Image (cartoon, rainbow, N blue to C red):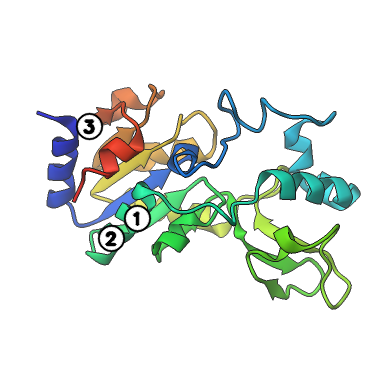
Amino acid sequence: MDDVKELQKLIDKSNNIVFFGGAGVSTESGIKDFRGKNGLYKENKYDRPPEYMLSINCLLDEPELFFKYYKENLNSLDIEPNVTHKYLAKLEQKGKLKAVVTQNIDGLHQRAGSKKVLEVHGTTYKNYCMKCNKEYPFDYIFKSKGIPKCDCGGTIRPSVTLYGEMLPRDFEEAEEYIKNSDLLIVAGSSLTVMPASGLVRLARNKVVIVNRSETPFDRYADLVIHKPLKDVFGNLK
């Protein structure tokens, strides 16, 4: 049986679907991943590792460097949701998809229309003042010059989970959604980065993995599809 048709049958039979996506979901919109062959970690032009420049220590100790790197590399304002984002929004509207769990921080799922999005690494789509907690629009930091400042004088930061910080509450909520799902669709993730990749182990029912290359969890899945995401989600209804 054609693997996409098999996935369609699983979706048709399921009413409590959870989608868990990685960088591959957004790379098809033109966003660079972190660890790929052309990712941010491979094209680093700074004398510091990206892990430092996207850390809470850099934000606090060298905010000029942090925001310079952040604005250069994580701006997705001109990026549009792709066929996978749009398909998931429609699946949610049908009442079958209960949550999107994403490792991505670009906000493209929300822009495609998804309502229940659990961002386990935070998001560039929200910003707030570190001093008074006042919230700012998603494009505020990218359109600012230098260090973005609040009216109170505090520094405005993105709601991204930086290196050295605790994971957000969305992570615990994602665990519960995955445990209770009757179908977990994992897509666009190498499943090599912990603790997020460990979420797959929590699934108690059907698991489907869609990724261009093999993952360490392929052997545990009920269905594995090694194709570009657009060729899979673009052919589902």
Closer mark to the observer between disc 3 and disc 1: 1
Q: CA distance from mark 2 to mark 1?
A: 6 Å
- Left or right of 111 in this view: 127: right
Q: Kindly identify the residue that appears in the image at 82 percent across and 31 percent down.
A: 46
Residue 90, given in percent of the width and then of the height, sits at 28, 60
Compared with residue 231, is residue 15 higher up or lower down, i.e. above or below? below
Amino acid type, mark 3: Asp
Q: Kindly identify the residue that appears in the image at 89 percent across and 72 percent down.
A: 153
**Residues tagged 2 and 1 counted as in contact (Cβ below 8 A):** yes
Q: Kindly identify the residue that appears in the image at 34 percent across and 37 percent down.
A: 229
Residue 149, given in percent of the width and then of the height, sits at 84, 68
Secondary element under disc 1, as helix, strand or loop, is helix
Count of marks placed on residues: 3
Give the residue pinned by disc 2: 90
Amino acid type, mark 1: Lys
Compared with residue 223, is residue 65 higher up or lower down, i.e. above or below? below
Residue 86's disc is 1
Give the residue pinned by disc 3: 222
Q: CA distance from mark 3 to mark 2?
A: 24 Å
